[in-house]
Amino acid sequence: MRITQGTFSFLPDLTDDEITAQIRWALDHDWPCAIEFTDDPHPRNTYWDMWGMPMFDLADPAGVLAEIDACRTAHPEHYVRVNAYDASLGRQTVALSFLVQRPTVEPGFRLDRAEGADRRIGYTLHPYATERPAGSRYGAAGNGRAPR
């Protein structure tokens, strides 16, 4: 299952040249970038681990790409995303967010349905990845397949 989070989630994975172009566009709009990673991409998990500090002082996309590459090297089987912040209205707002790396295998989610009182139906997303401990959810730690 392909996780679809972020601005370009409907497109094939971006190349480094395409990532650089997006970073350049963000920096041209005075939007500093930050890099985050996680092995739990649940849609409600909005607080990923931050890689370093936000790069408020960088004006060259090559510097941001170098940090992306360092994060990819340190976490080869994690999701990695870039966030660009717009502070023009006096508050820090994510203006652009997109994935720059995915694990080799994305096990996906199970949708649990529960019927309640008054014919109410509730749904819960259960990510298969969380069946393993944090840090070993993808890659060599498991077989990479979703349970049946």
Image (cartoon, rainbow, N blue to C red):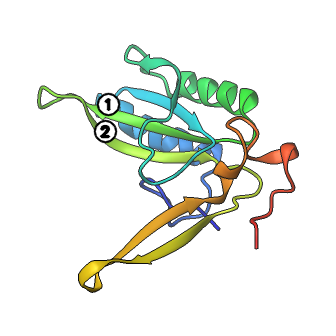
- Give the label, 2 or 1, closer to the camera: 2
Instruction: Tell me: 53 left or right of 27.
Output: right
Can you identify the residue that label 2 sits on? 94
Answer above or below: position of 12 versus 133. below
Verify CB contact (< 8 Å) between mark 2 and mark 1: no
The residue positioned farthest toward the bottom in the image shown: 119
Q: Label 1 sits on what residue type?
A: Trp
Task: Tell me what residue is drawn at x 52 percent, y 33 percent.
Answer: 36
The residue positioned farthest toward the left in the image shown: 89
Q: Secondary structure at mark 1?
A: loop
In the picture, the disc for residue 31 is 1
Instruction: Tell me: 13 left or right of 64.
Output: right
Q: Residues within 10 Å of mark 2 (few under 14, many from 20)?
A: some
Relative image position of residue 141 (x, y in whole percent): 85, 43
In the foreground, 141 or 34: 141
Q: Label 2 sits on what residue type?
A: Val
Quarter holding residue 69? top right
Quarter holding residue 80? top right
Relative image position of residue 96 (x, y in whole percent): 36, 44
Relative image position of residue 76 (x, y in whole percent): 75, 37
Quarter of the rendering occupied by the N terminus: bottom right
